[in-house]
Image (cartoon, rainbow, N blue to C red):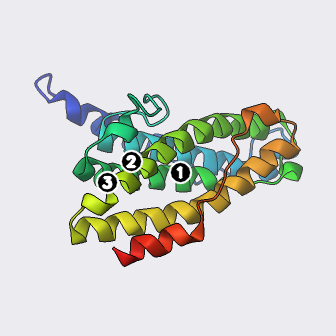
Amino acid sequence: MSLNCRFDHFPNRIFPNCFYVYSFKRIPGQKNGYDMSPFIRRYAKYLNEKAISYRTVAFDFCKIKRGKEDGMLRTMNTDKLLKTLPVLQNQLDVLLEFECSSNDLTNGIINMCFMLLFKDLIRLFAGYNDGIINLLEKYFDMNKKQCKEALDIYKKFLIRMDRVSEFLKVAENVGIDKGNIPDLTKAPSSLLTHLYKR
């Protein structure tokens, strides 16, 4: 590789799919290796999606500032927000594909994958929520094309809230302190009706 190659191409050349382990079937010497393999593959897929998100938006959604005053997604302009939220949604979707029940958390490896995903989920969803609040605040100032995109993003947000709730129920069932689990209050259905009227 040439020393003159641009740095932004470096990650793509070295590890374009470094977390792909789809051929992984079992851990030698482990009786329950076959039980673990789907979860290891799903976790690896999430890590790969997280790397793709980072390459796309140039920041880690799990490490951004959150909150009303200086939260990155809360203060982002409309055009950038409409491009950024779908990337976050994709990362969240892949995380939620882990799909396990409390009965699946049978050993340290699966438990550790779940706990790491739980920590990322809390941060991702907090940022996602900030972005949606910002989107709704800007909605009535958007042009028609932007409104259509924003409405699509908001409808997807409502669907994801149900999936996030299911993930958090598993977290509660395996003993994660309720104080660490956010309360997801659903937006009233009337809000969607008002947005359609725009």
Label 3 Cα neighbours within 10 Å, binned few <14 / some 14-19 / many ≥20: some
Q: Which x, y percent locates residue 111?
A: 78, 37
Question: As shown in the figure, which amino acid type bears the numbered disc 2?
Answer: Asn
Q: Are marks 2 and 3 in contact (CB under 8 Å)?
A: yes
Give the class, few, some or many, for how many residues have Cα within 10 Å of label 1's Cα (few <14, many ≥20).
many
Q: Nearer the viewer, residue 158 or 53?
A: 158
What residue would you read off at disc 2? 134
In the structure shown, which secondary structural element does the residue marked by tag 2 occupy?
helix
Q: Residue at x 85, y 38 (%)?
A: 107
The reply to whether discs 1 and 3 touch (Cβ–Cβ < 8 Å) is no
Q: Residue furthest top?
A: 3
The three-letter code of the residue at mark 1 reads: Leu
Q: CA distance from mark 2 to mark 3?
A: 6 Å
Q: Position of residue 93 (x, y in %)?
A: 54, 56
Query: What's the CA distance linking mark 2 and mark 1?
Result: 18 Å
Among the 4 quarters of the image, the one containing residue 106: top right
Residue at 26% of width from left, 64% of height from top?
146
Q: Secondary structure at mark 3?
A: helix
Q: Which quadrant, please, contains the C terminus?
A: bottom left
Name the residue rendered at 84%, 40% in the picture.
Answer: 30
Question: Which one is closest to the eye, mark 2 or mark 1?
Answer: 2
Q: Are marks 2 and 1 in contact (CB under 8 Å)?
A: no
Amino acid at pointer 3 = Lys
Residue at the spot of label 3? 138
Residue at mark 1: 92
Check residue 153 in the rendering and tell me which mark sits there, or answer none. Answer: none
Disc 1 to disc 3, how far (Cα)? 23 Å
Mark 1 falls on what kind of element?
A: helix
Residue 172 image position (x, y, % from top left): 83, 43
